Every structure is written in structure tokens, then in C-alpha cells.
Image (cartoon, rainbow, N blue to C red):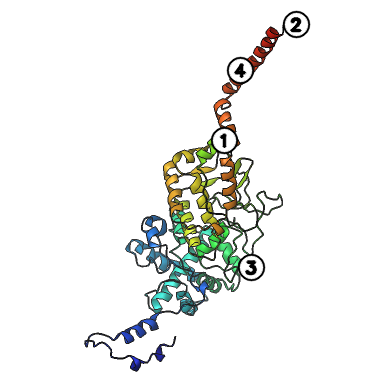
Amino acid sequence: MNLNSLNMEEVKEPVPTTSKEVPLEISLKQRLNKTLRWEAYESFTLSRVPTIVRESHKDLYEPRVVSIGPYHRGKESLGVMEEHKARCLIDFLDRNSKVGVEVYIQKVRELEDRARRCYTETINLNHDEFVEMLLLDGCFILEFFFRVRAKEPHILLDVGWGIKTTLSDLLLFENQIPFFVIETLYAVVTYNEGDRDSLLDLLEPYSISPDLPAGNKIFHLLHLYYQWFIPGRISKSSGSISFPSPRSSTFSESSQCKPIPSWLRTSNLSKSNGKPYKIPMRSIPCATELHDAGVTFRKKNSPCDVFDITFENGIIEIPTFLIDSVRRVFYMNLAAFEQSSSAMEHDLTSYVALMNALIKTNKDVVLLKRRGIINNMLLNDEELAVFFNQFGAWSTLYSDKHYFSPLFAEVQSYYESRWHKYRAKLMHDYFNNPWSVLSVIAAIVLLIFAAIQAVGVIFPGIHD
């Protein structure tokens, strides 16, 4: 829309205004001129967690030690780290003494308009403030990973909680800057323009993630870890990501697998096949109810990737799910990122739906812990049950995007079978322990002897 084409003279009989009031036509034009136009859909990659979700779980979505980007900038509780950012910038500049700070400023200034368009909200910072924020935050991120990779001494790394707490903050959904800013700064300091592989290697300090296909779009640091954490992503956006085809419920021995990092390791899931399912939304009974109905829970040994869960012949296998306070924050922010885009297959949300269905009370947690499926490092089992219940409460899951609809259908069908329930009751009541088994065998033997004796009485000549 050309704002200058608005013809002020065509407005008939305007309402009189006082000398202090600005006519609506002028104020609206001024407002529209200050508003950034919506560019391509892919530009909007940095948004907030919905207020209704964040207000009840601020500790999961707000930084504790460092703010990155504009959303939490200027908070008094994070002021100390702003001083550390300046020190990190000095250390960062020392890594390439041939390049002065003015070069970095100019490079970031060239990215300002593009970076502003990534945020769904208008950022109320002037040009210099916005560029300074991107420069300080981008250099802080890179300097942090440089030191983690090289195990160099630093105030953030020398305290016991430093690395995990800082990394946790760097992976918050609302605590991000565009990834192309980080790429640009890295290219200048290392003279490796276009060498994304070395940058990804730096940002992957534990050397455990699968390689990303060339040309993969990366919106921000959390998006990068999302792609590492959930391999096999298929985006429906214009920059679609190519991954191996979905496998059957069992994995080939020749599958190339890389382990999940110990600090991020979670349960793994698998598709039944590669066809899209359009099954009405359904849930399944909790773990204790399924157990009572004859379903056997087993820990999945040597899982291949984060989608390696199977159900066959009444046996459901799930890899160990490790949860603590740091991982809880990471999982919630991964899900928030996934929920923020309709261009994503909501596989993590589907996993949450599965675990939320299985875990309703601490009894379900106890059962899964005994089977080695859950390693709970939270305060207690009830806290874990509440975590999954809250986790799934706000997640939106549509039936045509439900990654585990086939598994839900198979488990529910098994559960509703009368034969499986009768067999489970028989096993529970009469074969629950060795003494019960011996008692049943003894009873059967006695019945056989009694039958033989009865036949001998009725037909006395049979022994002759």
C-alpha cells in the first residue's frame, strides 16, 4: 500500500479536533510508516511463548543468568552478565587481532533490517542499540563455545553450575538471535566465510549429533539443537529439509546411528511406516492400566535415533528417558519452538502426547522406573507426573499430524481385546510368583489323580 496515495481531501466533513489532537489520517499514516512490512513467511522465526503458557511456567522460559536478543534485554536480575558480555567481546576480538571492532559493527549493521524482520514483535531499539545488542550477544555465544570446546578457563566455566546453566539459557525459545548473525561473526573472526561445518562443529561441544544435510536452514541456536535432537525432520516450508525415509517399526542392522548426547538423551520413537495417517484423535490408558491388561513394558536397548519406540505382540519398548531440572527446561523450549510453526511435523508433541497418556500418576512413574524406561532426577515421582501432564496440557496436536496415531491405535486395540484381559488376569492371579505356579501345578496333579481314581471306582474292571 502506498501511504502517500491517501487523499486527504477526499475525507468529507472530518470531525473537528482540538489543537492538541493529531488527525486520525495523519497519526495512522505515521504508525504505518513505522511498521515493518510482512515479508516472506520464513522471515518470522523469533517469537514468544504464548502468555497463557509462560505466565504459569516462567522458570521454564525465562533466562536465569544471561539474556540473548531483545525479549529479556535490560532485566535487572541479568545485569551482571552484561558486564561479562563486554569482557567476552574483548576476548573475542583478541582471537583475530587483524580485525578491529569497527569491522564487526559494519558487518552486523548490514544485517540489521533482515534481523529485525525475524522477530514477530516490533523491537523498540534504535539502530545503534539494536546493532550493539546483536554484536555483544553473538560474540558472547561464540566466545562461550570457543572456551567450552578448548576447555579454556573462564568465570562462566569455573563454577559448578556455569556451563549447564548458561547453555540452558542459550537454548531458551525467547532468548535467541538470528543464526545468520552468528555465522557472519564467526566468518570474520576465523576467515572461514561459508564454512558452516566448522561452525556447527564448534556449537556441538559434545560431538554426538548427526550431520545436517548441506543447505539446511537454521533459524537460531535452538533450531539447530532441535534438528540435532530430532533427526529426520521434514519441513513443509519452501526450504524443505531432506532426510532419510521413515523406517518400519524395526530397524535395519545396517542403520547408521549416532548416540544422543548424555545431557540431552530422551526416549526414542519410531514410525510404523512412512504413510500419513488420518486417524481420529484418541488416547490410550495409562501405564498401570495397560500393565494390568497384559501389556509388557521393556527398555529399548541400543536405540537408533529419537524415534525408536516399538509395540509388537503386547510388548512396548521405549528407550530410557532421563529427566532433571536442566533437561526439563530444554524439552519445554523444544516443544515451544515446534508449536510455533505450522510448517513442522509435530513429532515431539506427539511424543509428549504418548508419555502424557502413559503417565498420569506417580504409580505410572514407579512402574516405568522399574522397567528402566525412566531415570527420574527430579525431586520425586509425582513431580515428573505433573511435568508431563502440564507439558501436554497446552500442546496442540492434530490427528493428521499425529506421529504416533498408528501406535495409539495398535495399543488401544490390544487393550480392548477380552482375550488379552482374561489372560492377564489369569497370569496375575495364578502365575504371579513361583509359589502360585507350584500351587496351580499341584492342584492340576491332584485333579488328574482324582480323575483316575474316579474312573477306577466307576469302572472297576478297567484295571484288569
Kindly indicate whether the residue at mark 4 contacts the one at mark 2 (C-beta within 8 angstroms).
no
Counting residues from the N terminus, which is met first, the one under dot 4 or under dot 3?
A: 3
Q: Residues within 10 Å of mark 1 (few under 14, many from 20)?
A: some
Would you name the residue on which mark 3 appears? 214
Whether residue 357 sits left or right of residue 443 in the image: it is left
Q: Nearer the viewer, mark 4 or mark 3?
A: 4
Counting residues from the N terminus, which is met first, the one under dot 2 or under dot 1?
A: 1
- Say which amino acid is labelled 1: Lys
Counting residues from the N terminus, which is met first, the one under dot 1 or under dot 3?
A: 3
- Say which amino acid is labelled 4: Ala
Q: CA distance from mark 1 to mark 4?
A: 23 Å
**Which corner quadrant holds the C terminus?**
top right
| Percent position of residue 306, x then y | 58, 53
Q: Residues within 10 Å of mark 3 (few under 14, many from 20)?
A: few
Kindly indicate whether the residue at mark 3 contacts the one at mark 2 (C-beta within 8 angstroms).
no
Front in this rendered view, residue 393 or 93:
393
Q: CA distance from mark 2 to mark 1?
A: 46 Å
Residue drawn at point x = 61 percent, y = 66 percent? 241
| Percent position of residue 84, x then y | 40, 64
Whether residue 68 sits left or right of residue 262 in the image: it is left
Q: From the viewer's perspective, is residue 143 above or below residue 441?
A: below
Residue drawn at point x = 59 percent, y = 32 percent? 423
Residue 105 shows in the view: no
Would you name the residue on which mark 2 appears? 461
Kindly indicate whether the residue at mark 3 contacts the one at mark 4 (C-beta within 8 angstroms).
no
Would you name the residue on which mark 1 appears? 421
- Say which amino acid is labelled 2: Gly
Would you name the residue on which mark 4 appears? 443
Say what secondary structure mark 4 lies in. Answer: helix
